[in-house]
Image (spheres, helix red, strand yellow):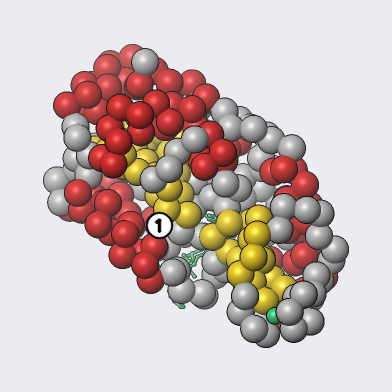
Amino acid sequence: MENKDAIKLLKDKINQAKNVVVISGAGISAESGIPTFRGKDGLWKKYRAEELATNQAFVRDSSLVWEWYNWRREIIGSKKPNPAHEACVKLEKKLGKGFSIITQNVDGLHGLAGNKNVLEIHGNIWRTRCTSCGIVEEHREKLTTNPRCEKCEGLLRPDVVWFGESLDENILYNTFQKLLESEVALVVGTSGVVYPAAQFADTAKGRGAYVAEINLEKTAKSSDVDISIIGKAGEILPLLVD
Ligand code: BJW
Ligand code: ZN
């Protein structure tokens, strides 16, 4: 199907639905200027995300991991939401509680754009967690490499979910509620290789949702969805909601 026809069909599905969910990944923030994880621009120095986003990496070399996060914090702090995020705000205005975003992103741009119903399943890069006392705090200011807890002097880590770590139970519960209620699920800008997020679209589809993927290219999940639209999130999403 041509993109033009696919967009018209999907727009009709969205207009008929009371419950819509967006499952977003790094690609939705790419047009804001935030690097994605995979693909040719996904590397930081010579490392892959899988080598840095683990507790083993943090225990082995916390300075290296903090350097990566501070580099990313600096980039993210200077970026703004793009038309894809803004289209999600429009959808929430129209559908209210019937619209939610399940994002793998830690950049906080969905919230900054104005969305309220956002489940950040991999945490948020602006929060830290103490590895000794567990306190979670927001820190927008520039952090040092290996910042320390003000309460107990323990080493702080980013409050994000690394490989091998479980997702927050409540967030996961709410995520599945949203997926099961959804009539339309839009999978935007994710390579679909990281679990459990990679299975969310199947969960929604298994309960009868119409599932559409919007991505620059075909992904691991393209053959499982009802419709796959190839293009930039910041160009396609606004066409679905205007
Ligand atoms: C555009 C665009 C534009 C570009 N417009 N598109 C079941 C099966 C197999 C493995 C597992 C499994 N269950 C668990 C695992 C292990 C593991 C896993 O999935 N491994 C795989 C690599 C195989 N998962 C976990 O460990 C998870 N925990 C868990 O399951 O707990 C239970 C458990 C515990 C212990 C043992 C076993 C189970 C946790 C995963 C945590 C992932 N964390 C990270 C870092 C978060 C913090 C941070 O940001 O620093 O999350 S890794 C990184 O990948 C980050 C992302 O959220 C995540 C996904 O990446 P995403 O968003 O898809 O980005 P990219 O770069 O991959 O893709 C971008 C896409 O955008 C591309 O497709 C582009 O084409 C597209 N694009 N520009 C539209 N303009
Ligand atoms: Zn502490």
- Residue at left 81%, top 60%? 143
Residue 170, relative to residue 230: is it above or below?
A: below
Indicate the position of residue 70 as horizontal and vertical percent values. Answer: 78, 56
Is 241 left, or right, of 8 in this rendering? right
Answer whether residue 21 is visible to the viewer in this image.
yes
Is 236 left, or right, of 210 in this rendering? right
Indicate the position of residue 238 as horizontal and vertical percent values. Answer: 43, 21
Along the line of sight, the residue nearer the viewer: 105 or 205: 105
Indicate the position of residue 156 as horizontal and vertical percent values. Answer: 72, 73
Mark 1 Cβ and ligand 1 under 8 Å apart = yes
Indicate the position of residue 124 as horizontal and vertical percent values. Answer: 58, 56
Amino acid carrying label 1: it is Ala
Along the line of sight, the residue nearer the viewer: 64 or 177: 177
The local secondary structure at tag 1 comes to helix
Q: In which quarter of the image is the C terminus?
A: top left
Q: In which quarter of the image is the N terminus?
A: top left
- Residue at left 79%, top 82%? 153
Q: How crowded is mark 1: few (under 14 residues within 10 Å), some or many (20 or more)?
A: many
- Residue at left 61%, top 79%? 134
- Residue at left 33%, top 57%? 175
User: For residue 29, what is the image quadrant?
Assistant: top right
- Identify the residue at the far right of this view: 144
**What residue does disc 1 label?**
197
Residue 151, relative to residue 85: is it above or below?
A: below
Answer whether residue 64 is visible to the viewer in this image.
no
Is 204 left, or right, of 166 in this rendering? left
Quarter of the rendered image showing ligand 2: bottom right
